Image (cartoon, grey):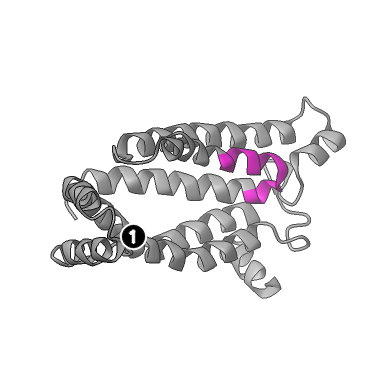
Amino acid sequence: MDSLVTFVIGMAGGDAALGIVLFTLAVRLLLLPLGIRQARTARIRERLAPKLRALRKKFERDPQRLAKETSALFAAEGSSPFAGILPGLAQLPVMWLVFRVATHPTALVGHDLLGAPLGQQVASVIAHYGLVSLPVSVFALVIVLLLVVAWLTSRQITSTLPAEQPELLRRIMPLLPYGSVLAAAVLPLAAGLYLLVSTAWTAGERAVLASRPL
């Protein structure tokens, strides 16, 4: 992990903050085909929603037949009921690696973003610099930007939730993006920077893919 962090910092000429941004963007670009595949599956599921509801109603007492008919319906579209899940699972190890880089405990010592230490949490920055200071303002800006991205993402999720989605999930799903805001409030600034870049990319990717044929 130390060598990877050194590489990330070195790719930006020793600027750790820029290195985290560039590395996150590079990884998200590499994962774009998986994102396109997820979006395509979501589009297919949305198109098949009326037929899926009819199948669930028709075979509600025969789960095996329901699963068979559902698979056949997706197969006719060149997809499967699990096609949207697998790309998401494939992304997790890579995104975990990027997150580990952004939260490395020692390699970020001495690196900052506009005077705010990348390896420190907001509480320790307040304790060291005071509540009214440039480093705390940098933290606050990152959190505010994350809040804006979370709001936009929440609206995207709300607009794409299928009508047959259980009411509990319809209430919970739009709240999930705000988890990044809470995480940034307790994690080091480097992690907040990573979350900002990654969630902004996700929101932009969703917007672009939703407006284009796949």
Left or right side of 100 for 52:
left
Looking at the image, which is closer to me, 41 or 169?
169
Q: Residue furthest top?
A: 132
Residue 203 percent coordinates (x, y): 40, 43
Looking at the image, which is closer to me, 122 or 168?
168
Residue 26 percent coordinates (x, y): 45, 62
Residue at (79% x, 38% y) in the render:
123
- Quick one: quadrant of the N terminus? bottom right
Q: Residue furthest right?
A: 128
- Quick one: quadrant of the C terminus? bottom left
Q: Is residue 80 above or below residue 40?
A: below
Can residue 15 be seen in the rendering of this structure? no
Estimate how packed mark 1 is, as few (under 14), some (14 to 19) or many (20 or more) residues with alpha carbons within 10 Å. many
The boundaries of the magenta stretch are 179-191
Residue at (29% x, 55% y) in the render:
61
Helix, strand or loop for disc 1: loop
Please tell me whether residue 37 belongs to the stretch shown in magenta: no
Q: Is residue 204 above or below residue 16?
A: above
Looking at the image, which is closer to me, 88 or 161?
161
Q: Which residue is the site of mark 1?
A: 84
Residue type at the position of mark 1: Gly
Can residue 13 be seen in the rendering of this structure? yes
Q: Residue furthest front?
A: 61
Q: Is residue 7 above or below residue 207?
A: below
Q: Is residue 199 above or below residue 104?
A: above
Left or right side of 47 for 183:
right
Magenta stretch: dominant secondary structure: helix
